[in-house]
Image: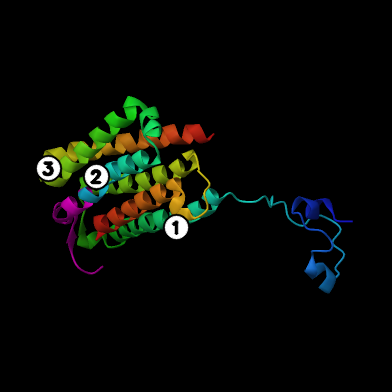
């Protein structure tokens, strides 16, 4: 708590591990859905495949690149995506 | 004659040992909680919620640290936005628990929905931990 922390340095020194862990979500989800049944996977429709690939590609790029502009854009995109999904999920609960 | 409350909980006068030991005349319903049987997925989802909460706690603790020791912290807006995102993903995962088809096979490792949410919940929690160090 007493030490000086620069969050920018912290962010760019940890971004690889963080984004790789986050990117794992899509392949794990895909394998798990496949384990349930092939028709179950197909029934999810093309939207599931497109969103999973986009999510995975975006996160993997964020893990690889130290480009600051990319991280700035992706932070905003991420936030919008999460807010949108939260609202969609919440609407289905009501 | 069992009361309506006991009947709802499937407790007969014969089964209620406490009533025989302590014969207190309870004449009215003391709880409005419905004691219905919990399905296995709902029961196991509590564990997933705990794991998700561990990750979300780390994010909140990190934000608290950021505010408390702000004189020794140089904030970076991308990091701040991402921390909102990490917290939001925890909420998305929690909400998605309600979406499950819940295939109720009790040995939990055979319940695909449970393993699915557990693995993904662990992943989320771990990445939240990495995010704040």
Position of the N terminus of chain B, as image quadrant, is: bottom right
- x then y, percent, for residue A13: 14, 55
Helix, strand or loop at label 3? It is: helix
Against B111, is B58 above or below? below
The quarter holding residue A76 reads top left
Reading the image, the residue beneath label 1 is B50
Asked if residue B16 lies left or right of residue B116, the reply is right
**Residue at image point 79% right, 69% down:** B17
SS assignment for the magenta stretch, majority: helix
Mark 3 to mark 1 CA distance (whole Å): 34 Å
Chain under callout 1: B
**Callouts 2 and 3 close, C-beta under 8 Å:** no
Residue A18 is a magenta residue? yes
Position of the C terminus of chain B, as image quadrant, is: bottom left
In terms of sequence position, does the residue under pointer 2 or pointer 3 come before the other?
A: 2
Mark 2 to mark 1 CA distance (whole Å): 22 Å
- x then y, percent, for residue B84: 32, 46
Helix, strand or loop at label 1? It is: helix
Marker disc for residue A68: 3
Q: Which segment did they paint magenta?
A: A1-19
**Residue at image point 33% right, 27% down:** A47
**Residue at image point 14% right, 38% down:** A70
Mark 2 to mark 3 CA distance (whole Å): 19 Å
Reading the image, the residue beneath label 2 is A23
């Amino acid at each position: 708590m007493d030490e000086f922390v620069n969050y920018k340095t912290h962010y760019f020194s940890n971004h690889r591990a963080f984004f790789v862990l986050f990117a794992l979500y899509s392949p794990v989800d895909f394998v798990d859905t496949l384990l349930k049944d092939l028709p179950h996977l197909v029934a999810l429709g093309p939207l599931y495949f497109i969103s999973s690939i986009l999510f995975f590609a975006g996160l993997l790029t964020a893990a690889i690149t130290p480009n600051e502009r990319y991280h700035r854009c992706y932070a905003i995109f991420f936030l919008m995506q999460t807010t949108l999904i939260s609202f969609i999920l919440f609407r289905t609960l009501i | 004659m069992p009361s309506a409350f006991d009947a709802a909980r499937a407790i007969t006068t014969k089964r209620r040992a406490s009533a025989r030991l302590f014969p207190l005349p309870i004449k009215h319903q003391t709880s409005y909680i419905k004691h219905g049987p919990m399905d296995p997925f709902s029961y196991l989802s509590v564990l997933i919620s705990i794991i998700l909460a561990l990750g979300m706690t780390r994010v909140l603790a990190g934000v608290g640290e950021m505010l408390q020791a702000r004189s020794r912290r140089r904030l970076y807006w991308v990091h701040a936005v991402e921390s909102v995102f990490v917290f939001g993903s925890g909420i998305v995962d929690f909400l998605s628990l309600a979406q499950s088809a819940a295939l109720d096979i009790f040995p939990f490792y055979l319940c695909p929905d449970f393993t699915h949410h557990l693995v993904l919940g662990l992943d989320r929690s771990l990445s939240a931990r990495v995010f704040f160090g």
